[in-house]
Image (spheres, coloured by chain):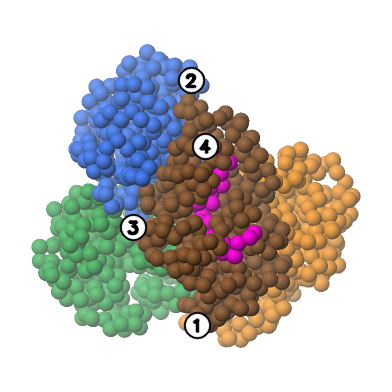
Chain colours: A brown, B orange, C green, D blue
Amino acid sequence: MYKIGIVGASGYTGAELIRLLNNHPQAKVAKIYSRSFAGQNLSTVFPAFYGSKLIFQDPEKDDFSDLDLLFLAVPAGAAAEYALRFSGKIIDLGADFRFNEHTLYEKTYGINHKAPKLLTEACYGLPEIFRSEIKKSRLIGNPGCFPTSIILGLAPLIKAGYRGDIIISSLSGTSGAGKNPTEAQHFAHRDENFGPYKVGNHRHTPEIESILSTLSGQNQKVVFVPHLIPAIRGIVSTIYVDKTESLKKVRDLYREFYKDEYFVRVRQADETVETKNVLASNFVDLQLYEDSHADKLIIVSALDNLIKGASGQAIQNMNILFDLPEKTALESFPIYP
Amino acid sequence: MYKIGIVGASGYTGAELIRLLNNHPQAKVAKIYSRSFAGQNLSTVFPAFYGSKLIFQDPEKDDFSDLDLLFLAVPAGAAAEYALRFSGKIIDLGADFRFNEHTLYEKTYGINHKAPKLLTEACYGLPEIFRSEIKKSRLIGNPGCFPTSIILGLAPLIKAGYRGDIIISSLSGTSGAGKNPTEAQHFAHRDENFGPYKVGNHRHTPEIESILSTLSGQNQKVVFVPHLIPAIRGIVSTIYVDKTESLKKVRDLYREFYKDEYFVRVRQADETVETKNVLASNFVDLQLYEDSHADKLIIVSALDNLIKGASGQAIQNMNILFDLPEKTALESFPIYP
Amino acid sequence: MYKIGIVGASGYTGAELIRLLNNHPQAKVAKIYSRSFAGQNLSTVFPAFYGSKLIFQDPEKDDFSDLDLLFLAVPAGAAAEYALRFSGKIIDLGADFRFNEHTLYEKTYGINHKAPKLLTEACYGLPEIFRSEIKKSRLIGNPGCFPTSIILGLAPLIKAGYRGDIIISSLSGTSGAGKNPTEAQHFAHRDENFGPYKVGNHRHTPEIESILSTLSGQNQKVVFVPHLIPAIRGIVSTIYVDKTESLKKVRDLYREFYKDEYFVRVRQADETVETKNVLASNFVDLQLYEDSHADKLIIVSALDNLIKGASGQAIQNMNILFDLPEKTALESFPIYP
Amino acid sequence: MYKIGIVGASGYTGAELIRLLNNHPQAKVAKIYSRSFAGQNLSTVFPAFYGSKLIFQDPEKDDFSDLDLLFLAVPAGAAAEYALRFSGKIIDLGADFRFNEHTLYEKTYGINHKAPKLLTEACYGLPEIFRSEIKKSRLIGNPGCFPTSIILGLAPLIKAGYRGDIIISSLSGTSGAGKNPTEAQHFAHRDENFGPYKVGNHRHTPEIESILSTLSGQNQKVVFVPHLIPAIRGIVSTIYVDKTESLKKVRDLYREFYKDEYFVRVRQADETVETKNVLASNFVDLQLYEDSHADKLIIVSALDNLIKGASGQAIQNMNILFDLPEKTALESFPIYP
């Protein structure tokens, strides 16, 4: 039984890691950490977990030496420090290990990277694309929620040579913004309310472009506009690209590309893609359309931002690192309705 | 591996049975039945289940002989017919086997009972109250969602001798009303909209009174008003009774009564009970309050109507029938947020 | 044109006063006040009001001498101070002038009343019950949202002599909790979540009991449990009383009692009461049921907590004070859907 | 007082016309028509309108001769027939009079136009663009909800000469789909659920292209993907075009273009556009962004689909036809929260 630690377990992704790992037959949450809640029971912070025996510990007072793996759900900058303190395997749900080189990270997040040399030990944790590299890495930069939905939607096309314009309109439930109360997320304000935010300057844009550029071997730009939707979970990305092949050929390309991927479901031609079909699961649904009169191809992807977009993917990465079946603890179908 | 059949698998409780059993190590959904969808894949009806190989069969054309247990999620009246056709174990999610005698059933549901003699083989499937009887029964009448929340909220008090007034205000998400589109459940109508329905004549009232009367040994009446809430899942029952003991003593009584029950969580005195803490789990949360200036005791219970209020409880009953650990496939913590 | 000032205009009830008065032909919002936002445009705080010329002023720096009436939407305690500073007509949306005598107020709100002598100039602003007293008063204590729904639901019965038990289960949208972000109102927490709060100790209980006692001429207790619902607006109160008359007689009593009241709609026997039918209007819908087998009468009332439960009722009171038709600026039908 | 008739008054846009006209000082809803509900009171269909005296009449049994104007909220094809029967002014909320010539209409809606000759008397009812033509027309084709949001977002740019690519991602609340219950709009399905629909083949695409082509004087194509959002009302359109000018110049262009338009609010540079800021009002909010690193300009527009996107705009057109101030009955600020 692998012994797992979670630092920053008092946020939404931490709760989701605990819930999912609770059903894992070979891994066990041994310790949870939180500076603010050290000494308190898990169920004080998350009353839904009433019955759990887990108690938050102060991460400053432990050396993690009895742990097999550490999940980090901490603010940008903090993860690099933990990676210096703990020499075991780390999966960081933040951005500290998502970039190949520290300058783009520093420009994007506005802080100095605390451990730039460790980036050589790190891998971008998108299993469907970088599985073999993940297996060999000590540090995993678990992808952002929007980038996961977008890169999985574009990878087959980019790898097949697409180099044209890419315009992305993404929609997201509110849980991606985290647990701290804000005016934007105040129920009476957010309910029955939707619209774009951080237009043209979202931190996920450099992450998306960086990985797409890796895949294409050249500099790839995207236009990315996220929208906030009055729902708890879910991301839909609608991606507009030039039509360079018939829809049939593109669909075949996607089916072939993902034919061995349990979590990526390239849906049938007549099926609708919507978040409800993936909620509470690690699945990504993909759909392809053409707008023939305007010569555009439209790719749609949907996922649960807290699972395939965060904690589920993190566990998928953990399974890879431990050489376990990748689906372990992640096989559940979505909850419906 | 037990082989399970589900008749009426195209509704919400059917989907939930399939999802939960998918994680069961000793039971397997071998066949799903639906008259309307016979021949179609499960994912045609529930696109969330894309990837499943299950195909709906016509229940009229099978004799269920290779099955170990049948779940029935069919309209009132139909379950009794299946119980005549199949001599194995049956868990009926409807009302056909919830009543001791057929006359109250017939008055409540306005139809003749098709198999009144089978009622002697049947047991009300509320494990925390009737576990030993369930173990010995062939036919289980799985309780209604409101009755589960209410009877578990009242059982300790009634068994301790309470015989006074009982007034119940229940709130429910909309999934209890099923999958068929109606004006009352049309999104633009239901969203931002709440209020009571079936005031004074809900079908669950006789069921609640019947079981409470069994527990008390005398005729017990209740006033029950359900309210429809703009949420998908969840039931909260707020129960007003006379205060005959100190709150401390009542809390001790409840803690003692449920001390071995994994799924019933009598919460700490300062904790809030709300549906979010039980969603997507088989837990029931209970809380106790007093209104000392008016000499009333207030009991609050919360559960997920499709799990502890339906399919989860049905699997709990199945585990009892098969002598498996009762928590099997039901241990998950709630999904939060 | 009456010149109106609003102190504390940066909250939800302030916004609603501004919106409603914007359509008033004989009253005009001349000044809005806020300490925190003094100097800023109304639309900085409420972007929905873009185009308005109103600018927040510091209420400490004005003597209100050019105003005909002051609405106060300020914390408990502050209103009494304004009433000492301004000798004109005041409608307070808080609790400072809702109680006949200061001791109950002080016990309930935990602060000393700053102007207990002024209570003799004050009237409880529930027009359908106290219209003639309102007309003669300088200070109006605008009722709380829950009390409005409950007192209007009980007044005919109490005035007709009812003195039995009263149990009230109320449901409320979240806007009643105000504009400040909190964990309880964080969208990802509140959405799909409902349950009771402040059980047995809500501040509106003494207000309800105080007014009912005035109506009955003797001490009247109630049991009151509010529930929070994932909706922005709306209150439903379900009130359980003993059945002392036939439903027909009670319905006739209510119809007669409210026959001249435009804003109180005693619905037809077969009609559903739900919040959607009153949202964005000053209407209160009332419905009556009996639970004949348990000898209880059930009264249901529904209103928009920010309109009939706050700002709409305040304008209704203003119209009375100015001897204008009571419906002025309040005649709109609800918004549907 | 102008006498107004509404045919098809039993749908959402009909209800909204009645509600808004109820506050109109110079126009009065004299008659409402519905085949299905003829003989029934308005409040039977819309319980929110309890108190109204309006009764549905059969439109087949009237010649509308005593009416000054007819609003039509009927299925495609039916409006043309009414326009042949009634020679007075007509505002059609459907598509029968939105196209210059009948062939594009017939291709789009799959039916023959019943009165193609009348198209010469018709005008596209977008006041901010076609005000002077509207004033002179007998028949007004009230624009679709998506086209209103998109054309107002693009008109300044197109009129200034833009001829490049146009990609539109629109989000819509569910009320645009109408009042009839469907699986897609069933609350338990729709809540917490969002995604694109009718990708590449929505009926509003030809309408948008047709009007943009009129404005540009040449054939203008667009890519348009609508998304369904779990909210009752509201449309947001996010429009991606090539950046040919500085953002500053484009903002100046839009401010100048709409400087006399009360209902179009070009927001300040730092302001967020979201549906909440326009709900229950006739306003359209516009915002402009640049994605400088990818050389794209992003235009965002938001409106209430049932008001500026339907019934409010229809009344705006009516005011123009009657030479009344255009804001009459439409001046209200949005409802917040």
Kindly identify the amino acid type of the residue bearing the numbered disc 2. Answer: Lys
Are discs 3 and 4 less than 8 Å apart at CB? no
Q: Which residues are magenta?
A: A135-157
Q: Which of the image's four quarters has the N terminus of chain A?
A: bottom right
Q: Chain of mark 2?
A: D
Q: Chain of mark 3?
A: C
B253 is higher (above) or lower (below) than A27: below
Residue ID for mark 2? D107
- Between circles 1 and 4, the one closer to the viewer is 4
Q: Chain of mark 4?
A: A
- Provide the secondary structure element on which disc 1 rests: helix
Percent coordinates x, y for residue C230 in the rendering: 48, 59
Residue ID for mark 4? A162
Identify the residue shown where x is 27% and y is 33%.
Answer: D156
- Provide the secondary structure element on which disc 3 rests: helix
Would residue B336 be counted in the magenta stretch? no
Q: Which mark is residue C307?
A: 3
Percent coordinates x, y for residue A45 in the rendering: 52, 74
- Between circles 3 and 1, the one closer to the viewer is 3
